[in-house]
Amino acid sequence: MSKAPKADLGSMMISKGKAAEAMPFASSAAIPPAAPPMTGAPKSLTVKLDGDLYAALRTYCYEQERATGARMTHQEVMVTALRALLSAASRS
């Protein structure tokens, strides 16, 4: 059983000038960005909140539950707020 010859890394070297000009993974055809999905299954989103904002969200949910008698989740609050923000932005 013979061993495969080792690759000569010296033959793969290029000058710094050529390396700076190189565009790795570039193609000649421009790829347009994908359109955002408009329908289909719900998408998940993770949001990281600092301690004060998270505490305010918990307090808001608790107060809404006490006022309405219905459970209100953090996700429901954030989705409602996001819809209101995007609706206001589209009107302006």
Image (spheres, rainbow, N blue to C red):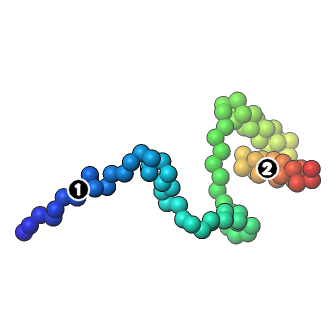
Residue type, label 1: Asp
- At a point 77% along the width and 41% down the height, the residue shown is 61
Mark nearest the camera among 1 and 2 is 1
Q: Is residue 23 left or right of residue 69?
A: left
Label 1 crowd bin: few (<14), some (14–19), many (20+), radius 10 Å:
few
Snapshot quadrant of residue 54: top right
Q: Earlier in the sequence, mark 1 or mark 2?
A: 1
Q: Which residue is mark 2?
A: 82
- At a point 77% along the width and 47% down the height, the residue shown is 77
Callout 1: helix, strand or loop?
A: loop
Please state which of residues 85 and 1 is positioned toward the viewer in this rendering: 1
- At a point 18% along the width and 58% down the height, the residue shown is 6
- At a point 28% along the width and 56% down the height, the residue shown is 11
Residue type, label 2: Leu
Question: Which image quarter is the N terminus in?
Answer: bottom left
Q: Is residue 35 visible?
A: yes
Q: CA distance from mark 1 to mark 2?
A: 57 Å
Callout 2: helix, strand or loop?
A: helix
Q: Which residue is mark 1?
A: 8
Percent across and percent down for residue 33 are 66, 63
Please state which of residues 72 and 92 is positioned toward the viewer in this rendering: 92
Percent across and percent down for residue 30 are 62, 65
**Do tag 1 and tag 2 residues touch (Cβ < 8 Å)?**
no
Please state which of residues 16 and 62 is positioned toward the viewer in this rendering: 16
